[in-house]
Image: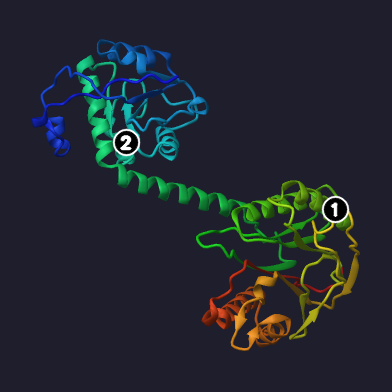
Amino acid sequence: MISSFPWPDVPAGLACRGDVEQDARPLADFAFRRDVTLFLLSQDEQDATLVRRLLAPSRLTESLVWHRHLRDARLLSSSRGAPVCILVGSTPVGQSLSDVVRWIRRRAPRAAVLLLGGTNKQTATKPHVGITPLAGWVQGWVDHRRTAPHEFRREIWLALQRAHRDTAPVTVRVEELIAQDSALLERGLLPDVTLRGDGFTTGLHYAPGRSHALLGGDFCDVVQAEDSTVHVVMGDVSGHGAAEAALAVHLRLAWRTAVLCGQSQLGQLRLLERILVDERPDEDTYATVVSLVFPPHGRSIRMVSAGHPGLLHRHSGKVSWVEPQPGIALGLFPGRGDWSEIEMALADRDSVVLFTDGLYEGRTAGGRLGEEGLLRLAAQYAHLEPQAFVDALARGASLLAAPFGGLLDDVAVLHLGWNRSGRV
């Protein structure tokens, strides 16, 4: 159970009017009358001992909650809505002061944060060095090894007052930090389809349908085996939310693992369906998937489709539509997949383009763009190099749909092909 300590009763004449006046106030052994929640985060037991001694004259020792490790510090806010002050002492091994403060700000954006400079290496000898980079994130610094009890309690009060005054700006900064972290996480989950060497060419366009997001329910990946065989997958999880985006990441990573473990294309699809059924947010969620294998000889590709749209075949400056033998989408009828592997011949420097249905489902002046409209659009860009072709195709479809709300679904486009002679 968390104890509480009273709020300092400050004379009306000493009301806050900025940091300069606050810091210039006469010191006093304040009386306390309002509940506050107080935490200490430090791996050093000596910090806890010193802080208890400093708080003891005002009975604040009873309200102090000490956490040695961040993983144990779950109670960083008060369920009663009382103000919170978090004292930060010696940081855990391998974590900087900035890391700890950021961790706190994500979980307790409205709390006052007071740094203890006596044991923290970043603030022990040069306080400004540790605090300056954290300006706006902490409400003060105090050397608890050289501070008298009444001064220490005064610093707590000042930190709480600054936090109360700066609540809105701090909350905004925390939201910005969380958004930045989310973007970094999503960016790290996106595949890198660029292969080493110059034998195989890829081009990628990926755009989620969700606003302010980097990941959607579409997924794709490319893996090149040690014998130079190139394995490719593209899929589309039904739905457009964060849960579908997370499921798409599960499926992509599971497919990559299956390829590296040497599973066949049919075995890969069976594995993905099992994972989808176990992880999907509801029983109606399904996924369309297409899997391709490009042998190093370059004369053909092996293809398996589970309800996925067709693909574009680029040959001698022309573009044609290829519709693979259809199969049941993953998760529609678990365990009853009727997938089959087919082979498609390729000439030298032929390439194929995979995409999800979001590319051609947009509304245009003539109605839905559809497969035929997409093929006509692709023919206009048949002379372009792979990445330029992909970019132009996605941009063209987007421009056609722009007057009618744009492309509302996730869109993934992947260009693939050997760029050398097919004879090896």
In the image, residue 123 sits, relative to residue 146, either above or below, namely below
Quadrant assignment, res 86 = top left
- Quadrant in which the C terminus appears: bottom right
Pick whichever, 328 or 260, lies toward us: 328
Mark 2 crowdedness (10 Å alpha carbons): few <14, some 14-19, many ≥20: many
Counting from the top left corner in percent of width and height, residue 287 is at 75, 60
Q: Is residue 104 left or right of residue 241?
A: left
* Residue with the mark numbered 2: 138
Label 1 secondary element: helix
Quadrant assignment, res 397 = bottom right
**Going 16% across and 26% down the picture, which residue do you hit?**
10
Q: Is residue 315 left or right of residue 156?
A: right
Counting from the top left corner in percent of width and height, residue 25 is at 11, 28
Pick whichever, 228 or 169, lies toward us: 169
**Going 23% across and 34% down the picture, which residue do you hit?**
161
* Residue with the mark numbered 1: 270
Q: Is residue 177 left or right of residue 7?
A: right
